[in-house]
Image: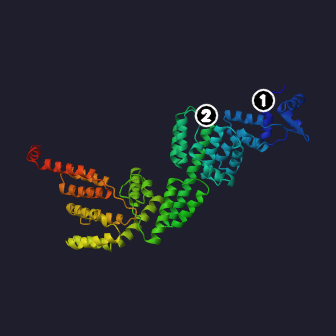
Amino acid sequence: MYNEMYLNNMFDKIINDIDLTISELSECGFTKEDITLLVNDGILKFENGIYSLKEVEPLFKYGRKLLGQKDKITAQKCFLKCFSLNPNHDSVCYEMFIRSIDEKDYITALKCLDVMCKSDNLPHQIDNNLYLFLLSVITDLPDKYKEYVKSLRLEDILIIYNDPRYENKNAQNNIRKTIFAMKFPYALKQLNHLIGNSSRMTSRDLILKTLIIRAVEAERERKKELFTLAVNKDYSGIIHYLQAKEEKTRLSINDISLIKIALEILNIKRTKEIPYPPLIKTADIIVAIKRQDYKQALMLKKEYMTQKEITTKDALTLLLEDICALIDDLTLNEKEDEITQIIKLLNEGQSFEAFNVLEKHMQEIGKEEYLFLVVDLIKISILKGDGDFSKARKMLSYLKRNDFELYLAKYIEKFYLSLAYNSFDEAYLYLDIITRGCDLKGDNTLASNLIEIFNLAKSIATSKEFVQALGKN
């Protein structure tokens, strides 16, 4: 009667590509009766004078046993043999997938995934979606997968609530959300933290960690190429490079921002027209880029680099610097027209002439209804000793936009700050902007309330008792 040791001896010969003759099987410890029993038990079959495995399952189980004994090298040889014997065995393909991605053998990995994707098990399908998504970042997928991967939604890679294979589903799904956002270094950090707090590292953890590491490596190489294109100011090259990437995988928010800025630079160079961002600022770099507020985006990017002690610029920083320099150059040339003339007249004390030029300029751009706004901002600059008249200068640039809209919230805030510092002349000018702005919007309720507040605050501040109280303090 044969035993496990004899079977293991036989499996070792199979792994090492030794033909199973009667002599070789005898060396393993089998008798003729044992060999007959192996055939009758469906383990071996006999063809052309050679015995061979009828099914790959016993050899696969031997490979799993070798893994349990930490004999990874022999286990690897075992799984390779299993795969050569039956490349459509689900479990064999799973083990080969793990080893293929580790060795960067993506041709074999995708062959294995072909088999794995045939599973009708929903949790397994979800994992396979995740693996395909990551592989699309790492390598060039076959055409049959490209469109499928691009159609994947976040929900398609998230673990379902009743999947028994995962302990901390929330943490796992947070990692998957980070992956879907193309933030692979952070996803790796999340996964390492999760593994560190777990009782053991599962095969699924190993697959995910390996794929994330490979994705980090692939994106690092892409960033190097984009940086080179940015250094060479090859804006068309950046666009074409990222469009080619989009044919293979999902673009990151950073990629989309690079395309937007590169297209904007090319458009500015062609049209000589400067983009005018909204007055409301944001603390989000990506939002600032979407709003065409490139100077704000560059400032935020530099602040982030300082905070994180990053000394090396990336492609996004270079493009932001380029577009800001381009805007500055065009703005400088633009300032040689009416705007510069107005500021020059104001600095020379020729206020009447300056306002005549301003009024004509406002009529030319079709924004004469906002003349009060520029005038009040000029007066505020005079109060503050701002000889560059920066507020008015910026406003004149914004007013050229066809979609300009007056937002009063900013001026209401300035109004209250001026009152807090007893700067009543300045507060009055902000109140004038708010009042006239309300007239344009057809709602004077807010303005009436603020007028009462202004009068009350000024009355209190100038009262004898208030002045005496301040003196005592």
Q: Residue 311: percent from the left, percent from the top?
A: 42, 56
Farthest top residue in view: 1
Q: Residue 247: percent from the left, percent from the top?
A: 61, 57
Farthest front residue in view: 442
Kindly state the secondary structure of the residue where label 2 is placed.
loop
Q: Residue 320: percent from the left, percent from the top?
A: 43, 61
Farthest right residue in view: 48
Q: Mark 1: few, some, or many residues within 10 Å (few <14, many ≥20)? A: few
Q: Quadrant of the N terminus?
A: top right
Q: Nearer the viewer, residue 310 or 278?
A: 278
Quarter of the view holding residue 117: top right
Quarter of the view holding residue 291: bottom left
Q: Which residue is mark 1?
A: 5
Answer with left or right where residue 87 lies relative to residue 207: right
Name the colouring of the figure.
rainbow
Q: Nearer the viewer, mark 2 or mark 1?
A: 2
Q: Is residue 400 above or below residue 104?
A: below
Q: Mark 2: few, some, or many residues within 10 Å (few <14, many ≥20)? A: few
Q: Nearer the viewer, residue 415 or 343?
A: 415
Q: Amino acid at mark 1?
A: Met
Q: Residue 371: percent from the left, percent from the top?
A: 28, 65
Q: Which mark is residue 163?
A: 2
Q: Nearer the viewer, residue 363 or 61?
A: 363
- All told, the count of numbered labels is 2
